[in-house]
Amino acid sequence: MTKKTKYTVIGAGHGGKAMAAHLAFMGFPTTLFNRTPERIAAIKELGGINLESQEGGPRGFCKLAFVTSNMAEALEKAEMIMVVIPSSAHADVAKACAPHLKDGQIVVLHPGRTCGAIEFAKILREENCLADVTLSEAETFIYASRSDGPAQARIFRIKEAVPLAALPAKRTRMVLDIIHEAYTQYIDGGNVLQTGMNNMGAIFHPALAILNSGWIESTHGDYQFYIEGVTPSVARVLEALDRERVTVASSLGIRARTALEWLKLAYDTTGEDLHEAIHNQPGYYGIKAPPTLNHRYIFEDVPMSLVPIASLGQRYGVSVRAMDSIVRLASIIHRTDYWRRGRTIDKLGIDNLSVGELTYYVNEGVMDGIKS
């Protein structure tokens, strides 16, 4: 009998619980870690998670191998470490993992947003982690899922294809070969610059929330976010942001998907422009807006997605005035400086690299003699 890969899932939110339960359902020895013991107390007591799914998907009680709030315990036997937390916490998790990582372990960020793996690698270097660990990131999260209760998870949908890339990219095939035992949906995402530049949430989420801020605050999100929120004028702003993202990617030698191409790929939806295409997407009907502006669409997607894309654009000579305006408006609304808090290229330790040097780093893992 083939030995199954040992998984550790970091994070017991909507996504982490669904992933841990599904992995256990598929027969993989799975450990669930959450830094707050109260969040996983019921799961620990039961020894697992009750999983529900739509349309005949996996369901039932999924027994976990181990449930803990101790990072050393969580990583001790792990072969594949699935990080399923908001990207704003990636740096903290990297710092917490650093003393306990071992040679041969694989870390996957679900998702990395933009430059997640690059940030994780920099933190590990700063913490003097010498373990030969392979970092990788998914372009988006594989599940649409919700936590239904303290020890319950529900999967609404599992995506059919999710790009994934390792840092360095020469290790992507090895990561895919192992993760395919559980998830055949992961495909080669090129490199971590490519997965990061195809981050569609950076375009759709922050601007759509900010441009509808009056409506969100007056109705507490009681309107259709994409259908009523995307008017022709709002769509023109989204298109300007999307053009900037694609141009920044091009300056890095990357052919990023446009928002229209993404809608066609993800939902088989088309239109003459972004306004028409979004309104032609049946799945967007009925999705309500966030109930408040204190939402991950701003506090996560601005510093961890928009800021790194714009920062790369500024470094390599691309005008990112539309992105800068959204970052500044978000900073005013939240009374914070998202440029200071975000993943800028100086924070990521890549500000002195040419495009060629940056590409070599993400492909080969070497930067000025430093291995990732």
Image (cartoon, rainbow, N blue to C red):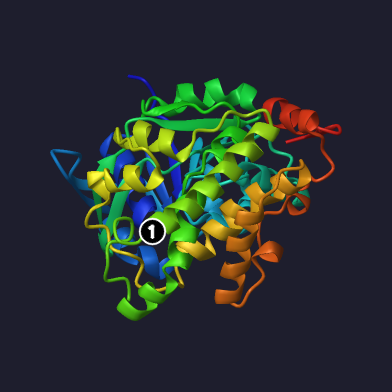
Seen in the picture, residue 213 relative to 321 is either above or below; the reply is below
Question: As drawn, which residue projects farthest toward the bottom?
Answer: 218
- Picture quarter with the N terminus: top left
- Picture quarter with the C terminus: top right
- Residue 244 placement (x, y as % from top left): 60, 44
Asked which quadrant contains residue 218, the reply is: bottom left
- Residue 73 placement (x, y as % from top left): 51, 51
151 vs 136, left or right, is left
Residue at coordinates 27% horizontally, 67% vertically from top-left?
223
Crowding near pointer 1: few (<14 within 10 Å), some, many (20+)? Answer: many
The kind of residue tagged 1 is: Gly
Task: Kindly identify which residue carries mark 1.
Answer: 13
Residue at coordinates 39% horizontally, 70% vertically from top-left?
38
Residue placed most toward the observer, 215 or 133: 215
Residue placed most toward the observer, 133 or 312: 312
- Residue 78 placement (x, y as % from top left): 50, 40
363 vs 202, left or right, is right
Residue at coordinates 43% horizontally, 52% vertically from top-left?
235
156 vs 87, left or right, is left
Say whether residue 55 is visible.
Answer: yes
